[in-house]
Amino acid sequence: MLDTLISNKTRLKLLLRFFLNPECRGYLRGLEAEFGESTNSIRLELNRFEKAGLLLSTSDSNRKVFRANTNHPLYSDINRILTKYVGIEKIVDDIIKCVGRIKKAYLTGEIALGLEAFTLELVIIGTDIDINILQCCIQNVEKVLHRNIEYLLLTERQEKVYLRDKKDIFLIWENTQLAD
């Protein structure tokens, strides 16, 4: 649906890249390789976003590196729209909150890098998780979102090892009430 409202594919890709995960950074040539599009169309959109104050840039050697301006008044609204578009909100509501003792949940893979993907990769940290209920919830959410969901269950000890060198991951939910 969002691609109907935002018909410029480059603009939509940039929104997903920068506003879905606030840690994402990018520069023109890197975005060209990721998107498979011309530098001219990407540069035009980057300049528009920067002029509007939605993106900030810094120089790194001879590169101009962009990131989302999380202090922009529209940042949280754009992030919320993209979260709904990708289905993160549905994952949190229907899977994470109804299954066992989940401590944290992460998105990983292409979505975590701000790229469009048909498959959502979910890493769940917790104990006493009922696999049957989890699989049932995931199947229901997949039907609603029209996306595949792959998941990995880890204990907190496994989480530390798994996250050590991961770059394509971001926290989407944390239950601070569960004891460590």
Image: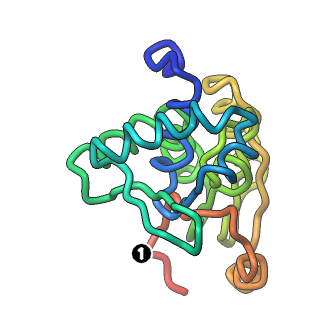
Q: Pick whichever, 121 or 79, lies toward us.
A: 79
Residue in the foreground of this view, choosing between 31 and 61: 61
- Residue at 68% x, 81% y is 156
Q: Residue at x 51, y 16 (%)?
A: 7
Whole-percent x and y of residue 94?
A: 54, 41
- What colour-coding does the image apply? rainbow
Percent x, y for residue 92?
52, 48
Looking at the rendered structure, the number of numbered marks drawn on it comes to 1
Q: Quadrant of the C terminus?
A: bottom right
Q: Nearer the viewer, residue 129 or 151?
A: 151
Seen from this angle, which residue lies furthest top?
A: 4
Local secondary structure at mark 1: loop
- 70 shown above or below 93: below
Q: Inspect the image, locate mark 1, and give the three-letter code of the amino acid beneath it.
A: Gln
**Is residue 53 rendered to the left or right of residue 101?**
left
Q: Nearer the viewer, residue 129 or 116?
A: 116
Report which residue position mark 1 lands on.
Answer: 177
Image position, residue 22 (x, y; %): 46, 59
Please tell me how crowded label 1 is: few (under 14), some (14-19), or many (20+) other residues with Cα within 10 Å: few
Q: Residue furthest front?
A: 62
Q: Does 92 appear above or below 167? A: above
Q: Residue at x 65, y 43 (%)?
A: 115
Q: Position of residue 31 (x, y in %)?
A: 65, 47
The residue that appears at 59% across and 34% down in the rendered structure is 40
Q: Is residue 109 above or below residue 79?
A: below
